[in-house]
Amino acid sequence: MNRAASALTLLLLAVVGIGATYLLQRSSAPQIAAEQRWADSRKLLDVLPADSYDNQPLDQPITLTDTGLSHSTLAAGYRATKHGQTVAVLLRNQTEGYAGAIELLIAIDANGKLLGVKTLKQNETPALGGPIGEWPNRWLQVFTGKSRGEPNDTGWALKKDQGQFDQMAGATITSRAAINAIHDALRYFDEHRTALLGSGA
């Protein structure tokens, strides 16, 4: 009898322990998922200073029209706001590099100035165009502060094409594709400014 009571007590303790663990996991799962999502979005959105916006830009997608641009294709757009005011627009832009598609995330402030560029996807040759995928990226940082008209249209090209920008060493095609895609995004922003900024402009 004593042995049976001990076994029953152990069984009850095990059931209570398992139940408590299950309830704890269930109650903390949404918080863990939210924290993971925040970490993932920060990794994607690190082209923006963390204190420059207070919304979740990825939860505010923008409906884009006329997405086929001169040298690239827009895949998505997002709006970053602070206190209800649009502070930046993020455009996911895809272009063709040397070894395949290159996808860039391009952040533009409300005045049309480039805040940053990050490569989201690329298949370039590791020793040549591959460094475009590194973050932070010194070559892509050169474009920060530029706009559609600064430099002018002819300046938005490699120096070897009579433009203003150096290329990544040994990666002419990759460099040219990235410059054209960034310029495309800035031009698109300029031409669709009102729709992109929304009512919170």
Image (tube, grey):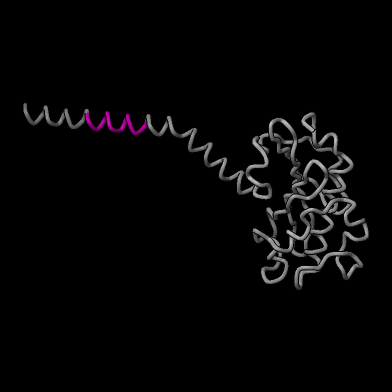
Q: Using residue 54 as the reference point, say whether residue 160 is left or right of it.
A: right
Counting from the top left corner in percent of width and height, residue 172 is at 81, 68
For the record, the magenta segment spans 13-22
Identify which residue, 155 or 59, lies in the foreground.
Answer: 155
Counting from the top left corner in percent of width and height, residue 141 is at 73, 59
Q: In this view, does 149 lie above or below 30?
A: below
Quarter of the image where the N terminus is located? top left
Residue 154 figure quarter: bottom right
Based on the picture, tell me whether residue 167 belongs to the magenta stretch.
no
Residue 62 figure quarter: top right
Q: Using residue 161 as the reference point, say whether residue 128 is left or right of it.
A: left
Counting from the top left corner in percent of width and height, residue 89 is at 76, 41
- Residue beneath the point at 84% across and 57% down: 180
Identify which residue, 113 or 92, lies in the foreground.
Answer: 113
Quarter of the image where the C terminus is located? top right
Counting from the top left corner in percent of width and height, residue 122 is at 70, 58
Q: In this view, does 134 lie above or below 171?
A: above
- Residue beneath the point at 34% across and 33% down: 21
How many numbered marks, from 0 up? 0
Q: In this view, does 74 lie above or below 177?
A: above
Q: Report the residue that reaches farthest toward the left.
A: 1
Q: Using residue 103 as the reference point, say whether residue 25 is left or right of it.
A: left
- Residue beneath the point at 67% across and 42% down: 52
Main secondary structure type of the part rendered in magenta? helix
- Residue beneath the point at 44% across and 33% down: 28
Based on the picture, tell me whether residue 14 belongs to the magenta stretch.
yes
